[in-house]
Image: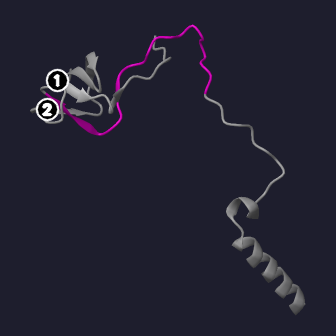
Amino acid sequence: MRSTRIAISAALLGALALPLPLAFTTTASAAPAQAPSVIDPTCTKPGPWTLSTKAVTIRAKASVNSEALGILYRGHKFTVHKTSGKWRYITDRTTGVKGWVSAKYVSRPSGVCLD
């Protein structure tokens, strides 16, 4: 009985020492992850603009060194009027402030149909 415990303990320690993919192998294979399919293939209208961070500074010019005019918070309604390089000219409809924000934080998902 003692030799069985030693053998099992040694096997367990050996399995724990192996890298994770080798220690836990399975015979079943999962299907590769696929992007969700579009329900309506004729839908090409882009969705609404979204903010990918909690807040972003609205600036007077398309530059990080320009004057800050306000802050666009997540949840505020806003309109994007134009894009210039890595900047977007917006109007914060909640506060009425117009200015430039970094395009890094403002995006528009494609293929979202909102009727």
Three-letter residue code for mark 1: Gly
Residue 50 in percent (x, y) is at: 35, 27
Type of residue at label 2?
Gly
Q: Main secondary structure of the magenta part?
A: loop
Q: Position of residue 81 (x, y in %)?
A: 25, 14
Residues at badges 1 and 2 in contact (C-beta under 8 Å)? yes
The residue tagged 1 is 99
Task: Read off the magenta span.
Answer: 36-59
Asked if the magenta segment contains residue 111, the reply would be no
7 to the left or right of 68: right
Q: Residue at x 59, y 12 (%)?
A: 40
Residue at figure coordinates x 13%, y 32% from the top left: 70
Residue 25, relative to residue 88: is it above or below?
A: below
Q: Is residue 45 magenta?
A: yes
For label 1, the crowd category at 10 Å Cα-Cα, with few meaning under 14, some 14 to 19 and many 20 or more, is many
Left or right: where 11 falls relative to 102: right
Q: Residue at x 84, y 51 (%)?
A: 27
Residue 115, x across and y down, in percent = 46, 10
Quarter occupied by the N terminus: bottom right
Q: Residue furthest bottom?
A: 2
Report x, y in % for residue 23: 75, 64
What colour scheme does the image use?
one colour
Read off the residue under disc 2. 70
Q: Nearer the viewer, residue 38 or 102?
A: 102
Foreground residue among 87 and 48: 87
Tag 2 or tag 1, which sits nearer the N-term?
2
